[in-house]
């Protein structure tokens, strides 16, 4: 935009805004005292191929003995609303060489708003820019000044500069000014490198200055300092922060009539411009995704450079008054609007051209009626295109319908399978729908009688013992429904891979009746101290350590009575946990509880092939009214320093909780403060059935947390927490660290993933097998009584070829004698004796291998 022009053009949302000044016409003297800033909104009419006025606005200014001018206009963002609005900078020249400047915003209602004003004792002439705020930036006396709507105060930047080549937004930096200043080399720079420095050779350098942060940026990330003497204007096409490094793509025009493309501070292409004295550059993205660089020249000419494989001049025009870039025809891409100088016509938008150097081309003074044949051809091509698109749309709709039918069929099959499963476990006959009813074509003749496999499965379900379930219960904990099935000992000992399923008994045609849930298995002992996550199972039972003669006495001291209480009484509870809120949408739900397992039978001390079974455990009723009344809520009350929660309540809390175990070791002092912390600050009370597990009654997020604290010795113990989420865990640990001695070492115990543990178990079993084999069959073992393995004649017979022995009667007798000697050697090898030291060493190796495998098996059962 040229400064000081009587009228200014600006493109905004596909429209052309024309700003100009006019005096108020009155009969009286008021005509000399009022000046109007007028705006006309012009839009391109694709029918008449002309610009027509849509609306207009006026801003009246008192202009007594003053000279008013339009300095410049631009589209900037209003920081109050984040909306981009047209912005106009006005000048009022007053007496005593005082110049007043006004910054105006134009709203969509054509109302002008005065953003701010300021006064200077000089006129703005050099490098005037409008940017976000709105704000005004200019250069005067080799100094940088700016003012914004937030401060309304003129501020100066601590830099000396000779020119401003670009102002815009940079990621993570805000508004940045790219300028040129005199080179200022640091004193610490090596004298040997001084002559080769670009700054030293050219005497100037680029710099970037961030307005908001008042930070200097390195100019070499834009372009080398060698271009500081020749670059007159820059346009930054793209900037981003990648791996904490600023990446910039830009084009620059030089006084040598060149356009240069820079990528990350390095030149990537250059193009000779068609005219001299280029003054500004802007970009446009056309409908074919071509990037165009529009260069304006001081002579009023315009050249367009296209960037494809290389930079090349695509088009040029002369006698151009203004060039604007916007979507003037509403096609979704940008076009160029060229306004030409025409002294013979007073209409400012009478001579123009709209083009994108492609299919879009409109020019004033052309009668488009003569192009009817071309329009008909375009219309015919458009019709063919629409027909092809309609065909593709119909094909897509057909594919969508086929997918919907396929999904509906799969849904019906799943629902019918669920109904058949429910009928099976309830020993009801189930009649499958015919293929015709399902809309399918049967590949075989439909039969009325059900197949024999169904009757066999029904008989299998009926053979399940009647009293295999001791109790079926349900609890509501937060947004979770917990369903538990307590199995009898005689039943679960013959099962493996046990799990529960919840199936809705209602017939819902729109949803699947199977409820998604997760399963857990918990074991209880008579005293309820050996919960599946209790303190005594922090490490596996030390059943084989008694063979270690050196640690026999230490074990009695370390575990005086602890492991004697781990004997299970056969109570095993299978638990299913599911989300409660989806079930409450039905207000009242009846769910069937199914148990799935593999039933195993032993015959002659050998395990027979297992069979999959499905057992009906019962039904549970769930209603919103019962939940509101707290019928299934967990009740943990205090009663004489004990927690009165039932076993089902405790199991429900543990089932929905996250478990974390921490090993705490103190080298300087005992860990007695932990008991005081649990009973005091955390307000915990032990369960009546199990004193080792305690319930937290403290108000807040930590309420409901279950702790288990076990001391191995006064200086080492393991703390296990069962909490709702990680936030509660961090709160408990934060409180715990406040009472622990500073020298304590806290370590999270992990059982490991199943995949890794399975591989470790295979390796451990292999080592155990090798240890057993080497202990009995190693030739290097030193036996106390060495044995003679056959006589010398027998050795000769062994060395002789078998074929030669069978050729004669004497050879056959020798072969028979050889077999008899081998039988005697086998018997003698089984009756070897070794001394006590060798046996103890061999036994310890075997026990160590077995302990390693047992440890991994225990960890695998806990993962």
Image: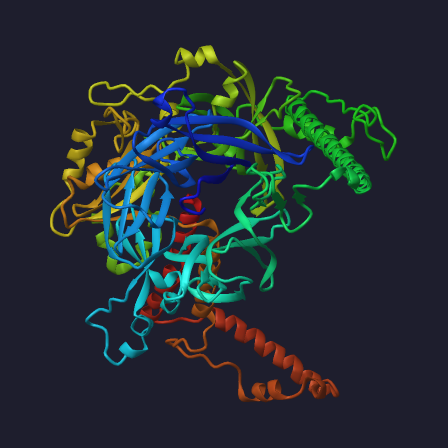
In the rendered image, which quarter is residue 161 located in? Answer: bottom left
User: Considering depth in this image, is 280 or 201 the residue closer to the camera?
Assistant: 280
User: Considering depth in this image, is 411 or 57 the residue closer to the camera?
Assistant: 57
| Coordinates of residue 344 in the picture (x, y in percent) | 59, 42
Colour scheme employed for the rendering of this structure: rainbow
Count of labels shown?
0
Instruction: From the viewer's perspective, tell me whether residue 34 is left or right of residue 396.
Output: left
Can residue 397 be seen from the camera position used here? Answer: yes
Question: Is residue 203 shown above or below 175?
Answer: below
Task: Give the residue at the far right of this rendering.
Answer: 445
Task: Give the residue at the far left of this rendering.
Answer: 669
| Coordinates of residue 446 in the picture (x, y in percent) | 85, 28
| Coordinates of residue 461 in the picture (x, y in percent) | 64, 28
User: Considering depth in this image, is 619 or 122 the residue closer to the camera?
Assistant: 122
Q: Residue at x 23, y 79 (%)?
A: 191
User: Considering depth in this image, is 340 or 566 the residue closer to the camera?
Assistant: 340
Can residue 484 be seen from the camera position used here? Answer: no
Q: Quadrant of the C terminus?
A: top left
Instruction: From the viewer's perspective, tell me whether residue 571 is left or right of residue 212.
Output: right
In the rendered image, which quarter is residue 501 located in? Answer: top right
Instruction: From the viewer's perspective, tell me whether residue 805 is left or right of residue 120.
Output: right
| Coordinates of residue 514 in the picture (x, y in percent) | 59, 27
Q: Residue at x 53, y 82 (%)?
A: 790
Question: Is residue 762 shown above or below 214?
Answer: below
């Amino acid at each position: 935009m040229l400064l000081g022009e009587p009228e200014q053009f600006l493109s905004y949302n596909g429209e052309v805004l024309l700003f100009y000044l006019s005096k108020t016409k009155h009969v009286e003297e008021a005509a000399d005292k009022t000046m109007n800033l007028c705006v006309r909104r012009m839009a391109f009419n694709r029918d008449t191929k002309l610009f027509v006025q849509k609306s207009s606005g006026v801003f009246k200014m008192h202009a007594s003995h003053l000279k008013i001018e339009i300095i410049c206009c631009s589209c900037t963002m209003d920081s109050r609303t984040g909306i981009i609005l047209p912005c106009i900078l006005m000048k009022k020249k007053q007496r005593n060489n005082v110049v007043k400047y006004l910054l105006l915003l134009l709203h969509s209602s054509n109302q002008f708003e005065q953003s701010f004003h300021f006064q200077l004792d000089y006129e703005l002439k050099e490098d005037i820019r409008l940017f976000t705020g709105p704000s005004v930036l200019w250069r005067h006396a080799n100094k940088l000044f700016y003012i914004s709507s937030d401060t309304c105060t003129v501020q100066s930047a601590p830099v000396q500069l000779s020119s401003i080549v670009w102002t815009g937004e940079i990621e993570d930096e805000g508004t940045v000014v790219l300028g040129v200043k005199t080179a200022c080399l640091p004193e610490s720079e090596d004298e040997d490198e001084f002559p080769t420095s670009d700054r030293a050779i050219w005497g100037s350098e680029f710099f970037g200055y961030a307005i908001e942060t008042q930070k200097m940026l390195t100019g070499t990330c834009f372009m080398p300092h060698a271009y500081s003497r020749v670059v007159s204007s820059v346009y930054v096409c793209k900037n981003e922060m990648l791996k904490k490094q600023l990446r910039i793509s830009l084009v620059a025009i030089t006084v040598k009539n060149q356009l240069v493309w820079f990528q990350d501070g390095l030149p990537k292409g250059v193009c000779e411009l068609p005219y001299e004295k280029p003054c500004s550059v802007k970009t446009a993205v056309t409908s074919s995704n071509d990037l165009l660089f529009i260069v304006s020249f001081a002579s009023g000419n315009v050249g367009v450079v296209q960037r494809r494989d290389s930079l090349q001049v695509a088009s040029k025009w002369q006698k151009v008054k203004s060039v604007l870039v916007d979507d003037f025809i509403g096609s979704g891409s940008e076009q160029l609007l060229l306004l030409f100088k025409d002294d013979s016509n007073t209409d400012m938008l009478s001579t123009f051209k709209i083009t994108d150097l492609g299919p879009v081309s409109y020019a004033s003074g052309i009668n488009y009626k003569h192009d009817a044949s071309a329009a008909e051809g375009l219309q015919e091509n458009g019709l063919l295109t629409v027909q092809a698109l309609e065909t593709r749309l119909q094909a897509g709709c057909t594919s969508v319908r086929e997918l919907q039918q396929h999904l509906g069929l799969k849904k019906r099959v799943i629902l019918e399978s669920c109904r058949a499963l429910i009928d099976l476990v309830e020993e009801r006959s189930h009649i499958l729908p015919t293929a015709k009813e399902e809309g399918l074509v049967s590949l075989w003749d439909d039969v009325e009688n059900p197949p024999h496999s169904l009757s066999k499965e029904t008989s299998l379900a009926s053979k399940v013992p009647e009293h295999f379930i001791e109790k079926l219960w349900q609890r509501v904990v937060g947004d979770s429904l917990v369903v538990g099935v307590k199995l009898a000992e005689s039943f679960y000992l013959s099962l493996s891979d046990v799990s529960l399923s919840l199936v809705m008994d209602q017939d819902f045609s729109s949803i699947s009746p199977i409820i998604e849930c997760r399963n857990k298995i918990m074991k209880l002992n008579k005293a309820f101290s050996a919960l599946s996550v209790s303190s005594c199972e922090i490490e596996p039972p030390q059943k084989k350590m008694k063979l270690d003669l050196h640690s026999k006495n230490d074990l009695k001291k370390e575990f005086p009575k602890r492991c004697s209480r781990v004997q299970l009484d056969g109570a095993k509870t299978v638990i299913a946990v599911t989300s409660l809120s989806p079930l409450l949408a039905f207000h009242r739900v009846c769910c069937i509880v199914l148990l799935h397992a593999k039933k195993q039978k032993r015959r002659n001390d050998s395990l027979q092939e297992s069979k999959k079974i499905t057992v009906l455990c019962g039904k549970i009723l769930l209603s919103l009214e019962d939940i509101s009344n707290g019928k299934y809520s967990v009740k943990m009350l205090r009663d004489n320093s004990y927690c009165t929660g039932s076993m089902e309540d405790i199991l429900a809390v543990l089932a929905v909780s996250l478990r974390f175990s921490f090993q705490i070791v103190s080298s300087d002092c005992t860990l007695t403060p932990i008991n005081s912390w649990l009973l005091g600050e955390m307000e915990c009370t032990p369960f009546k059935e199990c004193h080792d597990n305690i319930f937290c009654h403290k108000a807040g997020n930590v309420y409901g947390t279950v702790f288990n604290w076990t001391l191995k010795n006064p200086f080492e113990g393991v703390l296990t927490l069962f909490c709702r989420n990680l936030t509660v865990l961090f709160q408990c640990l934060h409180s715990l660290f406040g009472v622990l001695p500073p020298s304590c070492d806290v370590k999270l115990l992990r059982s490991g993933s199943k995949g890794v543990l399975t591989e470790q178990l295979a390796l451990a079993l292999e080592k155990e097998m090798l240890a057993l084999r080497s202990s009995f069959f190693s030739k290097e073992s030193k036996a106390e009584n060495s044995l003679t393995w056959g006589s010398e004649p027998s050795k000769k017979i062994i060395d002789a070829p078998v074929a030669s022995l069978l050729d004669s009667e004497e050879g056959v007798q020798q072969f028979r004698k050889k077999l008899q000697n081998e039988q005697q050697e086998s018997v003698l090898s089984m009756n070897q004796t070794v001394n006590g030291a060798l046996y103890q060493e061999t036994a310890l190796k075997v026990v160590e291998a077995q302990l390693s495998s047992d440890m991994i098996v225990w960890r695998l059962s806990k993962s």
